[in-house]
Image (cartoon, rainbow, N blue to C red):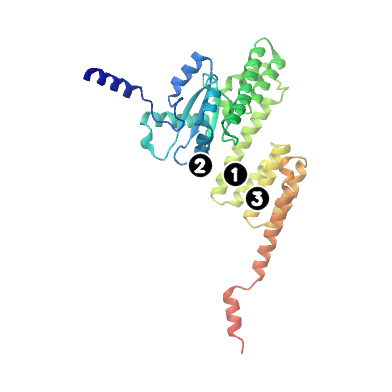
């Protein structure tokens, strides 16, 4: 009897999974989840969460993941993976912590909660996060995102029978349908980008040029940020002027560069020049989303200029005190 009880106890202990915020039905073993997804013909739903500190993560868990309608709605479509980044590290083994950090870097996760939907190999096809409305609405939202995989897979299958620019166009459509960040495209779909380049060496779609421009703009932002961290306004303005003179960027992207110029001038309290730069930025692409916000920003700069001028004209407390004491 004791042996039987001991056997039951031992097997029960060995079968207990790590305690996950999502509760039953979730796993923290990424590799095992991929194998399960491949075996069961499902996608992965990966929850990057901070279970003991992230307010929106906790709300998503309490409002959606813990409820039966959610679990019932996803059980035949997704393998659920919880990758937790708690402040209390004792909740996770060192192995799981290491895995989670590597996956956070690999997928470029910068905020929580982030929900990634991926295929059985871990290639993402959609990204989302917290949504209001409860479990039923969230399942509907996931079903809509799941369609992105269907569009992707259909396009990839179609591209196999095509050549040249026509093939490139279908592959471009597949990538655009997923609405993923360029960094994620480069990490997980670099082979498709290479196929696009090979099929359309003249870049008739303009997709490759667009990727290159985005990469150059990201590099420009990185350099500009380094000047900002040092409060080097002169260096930042020099970088901006050199970038504009090079003619590298056009349209909305050029407008953003000129807008950055206005912001640097404002930080340097050169408000008249900043207002002029805002006007220049708006003129570059007057129909853009950024241009629609320019008038409000221009008004704020004028207000800041007037306040600074008023402060310069007002006597300081010591001058006022000295003036009072000099009265007979």
Name the residue carrying label 2. 55
Mark 3 or mark 1, whichever is nearer to me: 3
- Position in image of residue 14 (x %, y %): 32, 22
Residue 59 in the image: above or below residue 296: above
Disc 2 and disc 3: Cα gap in Å? 32 Å
Which numbered disc, 2 or 3, marks the residue that appears first in the sequence? 2
Residue 263 numbered mark, or none: 3
Residue 224 numbered mark, or none: 1
Residue 13 in the image: above or below residue 222: above
- Position in image of residue 68 (x %, y %): 51, 27
In percent of the image, x 53 and y 32: which residue is there? Answer: 64
In percent of the image, x 75 and y 47: which residue is there? Answer: 280
In percent of the image, x 59 and y 77: which residue is there? Answer: 319
Mark 2 or mark 1, whichever is nearer to me: 2
Other residues around mark 3 within 10 Å, as few (<14) / some (14–19) / many (≥20): many
- Position in image of residue 147 (x %, y %): 63, 22
Other residues around mark 1 within 10 Å, as few (<14) / some (14–19) / many (≥20): many
Residue 222 visible to the viewer: yes
Q: Quadrant of residue 192?
A: top right
């Amino acid at each position: 009897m004791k042996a039987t009880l001991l056997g039951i106890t031992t097997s029960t202990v060995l079968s207990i999974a790590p305690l996950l915020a999502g509760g039953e039905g979730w796993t923290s073993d990424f590799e095992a989840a991929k194998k399960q997804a491949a075996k069961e013909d499902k996608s992965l739903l990966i929850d990057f969460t901070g279970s003991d500190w992230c307010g929106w993560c906790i709300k998503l868990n309490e409002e959606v993941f813990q409820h039966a309608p959610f679990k019932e709605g996803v059980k035949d479509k997704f393998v659920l993976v919880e990758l937790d980044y708690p402040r209390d590290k004792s909740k996770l083994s060192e192995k799981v912590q290491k895995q989670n950090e590597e996956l956070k870097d690999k997928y470029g996760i910068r905020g929580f909660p982030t929900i990634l939907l991926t295929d059985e190999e871990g290639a993402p096809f959609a990204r989302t996060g917290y949504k209001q409305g409860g479990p039923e609405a969230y399942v509907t939202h996931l079903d809509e995102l799941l369609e992105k995989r269907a569009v992707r897979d259909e396009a990839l299958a179609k591209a196999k029978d095509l050549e040249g620019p026509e093939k490139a166009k279908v592959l471009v459509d597949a990538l655009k349908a997923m609405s993923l960040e360029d960094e994620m495209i480069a990490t997980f779909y670099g082979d498709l980008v290479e196929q696009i380049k090979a099929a359309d060496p003249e870049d008739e779609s303009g997709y490759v040029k667009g990727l290159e421009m985005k990469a150059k703009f990201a590099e420009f932002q990185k350099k500009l940020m380094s000047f900002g961290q040092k409060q080097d306004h002169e260096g930042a303005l020099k970088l901006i002027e050199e970038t504009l003179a090079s003619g590298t960027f056009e349209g909305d992207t050029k407008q953003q560069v000129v807008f950055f110029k206005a912001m640097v001038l404002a930080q340097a309290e050169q408000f008249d020049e900043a207002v002029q730069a805002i006007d220049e930025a708006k003129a570059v692409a007057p129909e853009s989303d950024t241009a629609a916000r320019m008038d409000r920003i221009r008004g704020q700069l004028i207000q800041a200029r007037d306040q600074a001028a008023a402060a310069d004209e007002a006597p300081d407390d010591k001058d006022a005190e000295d003036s009072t004491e000099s009265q007979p």
